[in-house]
Image (tube, grey):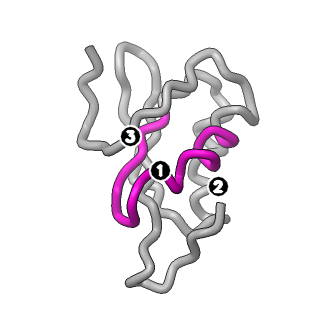
Amino acid sequence: MIDLPDHDLLLDCRGMICPRPIIELGRHIDDVAPGQVIAVLADDPAAAVDVPAWCRMRAHEYVGVGVDEGTPAYFVRRAGAESGERFTT
């Protein structure tokens, strides 16, 4: 059972190495509405740097990191039109 902070979509990227977790995040960002949060479970150490960097490049909000049974979960809030942020992935 996953006990993580509120999120709207969970991407299980455990076992995937760089750049797969970021590719999956890019593929699924449009699956949530602006303002909603995606949780990315990723055990690849590169994700700790890659997810926040991807958020900066794509103008989405990096919310932070949590841990589920030893696996980091990175939280990303999709950018919204009301703030003039980009939607491109």
Residue drawn at point x = 63 percent, y = 46 percent: 27
As helix, strand or loop, the secondary structure at mark 3 comes to: strand
Q: Which residue appears at 35% of the width and 21% of the height? A: 68
| Residue 58 vertical placement versus 81 (above, below) | above
Measured as percent of width and height from the top left, residue 11 is found at 48, 32
Q: Nearer the viewer, residue 57 or 23?
A: 23
In front: 53, or 83?
83
Tag 2: residue type? Ala
> Which residue is under mark 2?
53
Is the Cβ of the residue at disc 1 closer than 8 Å to that at disc 2?
A: no
Question: Three-letter amino acid code at disc 1?
Answer: Asp
Q: Nearer the viewer, mark 1 or mark 2?
A: 1
- Residue that mark 3 sits on: 9
Report the magenta residues as a range: 22-40
Write down the residue under mark 1: 31
Does residue 62 lie above or below 45 as drawn?
A: below
Callout 2: 10 Å neighbours few (<14), some, many (20+)? some
Asked if marks 1 and 3 touch (Cβ < 8 Å), the reply is: yes
Instruction: Tell me the residue at 35%/64% (across/down).
Output: 35
Q: Residue visible at 53% across and 52% down?
A: 29
